[in-house]
């Protein structure tokens, strides 16, 4: 989740943090959802159904790796919207097919509508598919590799407001280093933490959000 910042403010410990308005959105009298999930219907649906739900299928884990890398530096709002275009452009996120993409295919993708047409980002998807296969070769599944970073058990956080949610953690730094060492690209500590939130290694719904206790 890369929350679209509205402005920067000083937090209580004098760090410059992104101020997000509002902190939550009232769904009805009893129901509240995280404030970043508002406005766009695909973003709300993504929040309500997927964000923070533990993922164990390698294909879906790869899909989120692609989407998180694609959104690097951009607002999350664009990603759920572009997801189907990505699915279509990248062979349904099939990492075995993507690992075999050649230069011609990359050039084709550079003129494909609906995806972020950035050469480095597109090439990173191919490099990541290859590195993903290597991890599967070593660990059996990417699932067993990635869940080791949280000891196999999802971390349930209890943030009362969005401002308390970190952009990265010691675990995401460690994950980032290991992924980079293995040839992955667009896997900085912030992207890794966003990935951890998306695939449910951590539950970062704010405590008042109706999804916090459902997960
Ligand atoms: Zn939430």
Image (spheres, helix red, strand yellow):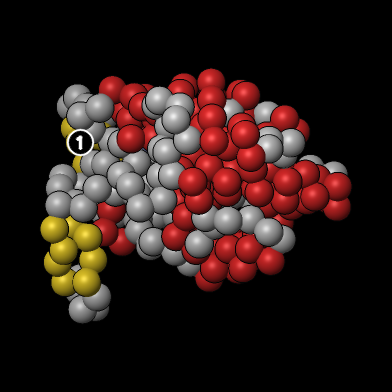
Position above or below: 47 against 92: below
Residue 49 visible to the viewer: no
Residue assigned mark 1: 25
| Nearer the observer, 17 or 25 | 17
Q: Is residue 152 rendered to the left or right of residue 194?
A: right
Looking at the image, which residue is at 26% across and 41% down?
Answer: 36
How far across and down, in percent of the image, does residue 122 sit?
Answer: 53, 42
**Dividing the picture into quarters, in which one does residue 57 lie?**
top right
Residue 155: horizontal and vertical position, in percent? 54, 54
Q: What residue is drawn where x is 23% and y is 66%?
A: 17
Left or right, 123 with respect to 190, comes to: right
Residue 143 vs 87, above or below: the answer is below
Q: How far across and how far down the image is residue 46, in percent?
A: 40, 29
Could you say whether the residue bearing mark 1 is in a helix, strand or loop? Answer: strand
Residue at left offset 86%, top offset 47%: 137
Out of 162 and 7, give the one closest to the viewer: 7
Decide: is 183 above or below 144.
below
Residue 5, x across and y down, in percent: 21, 53
């Amino acid at each position: 989740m890369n929350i679209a910042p509205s402005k920067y403010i000083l937090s209580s410990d004098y760090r410059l943090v992104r101020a997000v308005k509002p902190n939550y959105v009232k769904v009805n009298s009893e129901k509240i959802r995280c404030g970043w999930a508002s406005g766009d219907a695909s973003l709300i649906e993504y929040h309500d159904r997927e964000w923070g739900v533990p993922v164990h299928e390698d294909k879906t884990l790869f899909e989120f790796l692609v989407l998180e890398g694609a959104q690097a530096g951009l607002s999350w709002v664009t990603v759920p919207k572009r997801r189907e275009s990505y699915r279509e452009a990248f062979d349904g996120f099939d990492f075995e097919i993507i690992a075999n993409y050649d230069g011609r295919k990359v050039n084709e993708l550079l003129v494909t509508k609906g995806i972020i047409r950035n050469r480095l980002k597109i090439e990173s998807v191919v490099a990541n598919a290859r590195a993903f296969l290597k991890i599967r070769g070593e660990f059996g599944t990417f699932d067993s590799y990635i869940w080791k970073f949280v000891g196999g058990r999802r971390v349930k956080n209890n943030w009362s407001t969005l401002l308390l949610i970190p952009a990265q953690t010691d675990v995401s730094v460690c994950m980032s280093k290991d992924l980079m060492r293995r040839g992955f690209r667009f896997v900085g500590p912030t992207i890794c933490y966003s990935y951890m939130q998306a695939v449910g290694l951590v539950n970062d719904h704010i405590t008042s959000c109706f999804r916090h206790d459902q997960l």
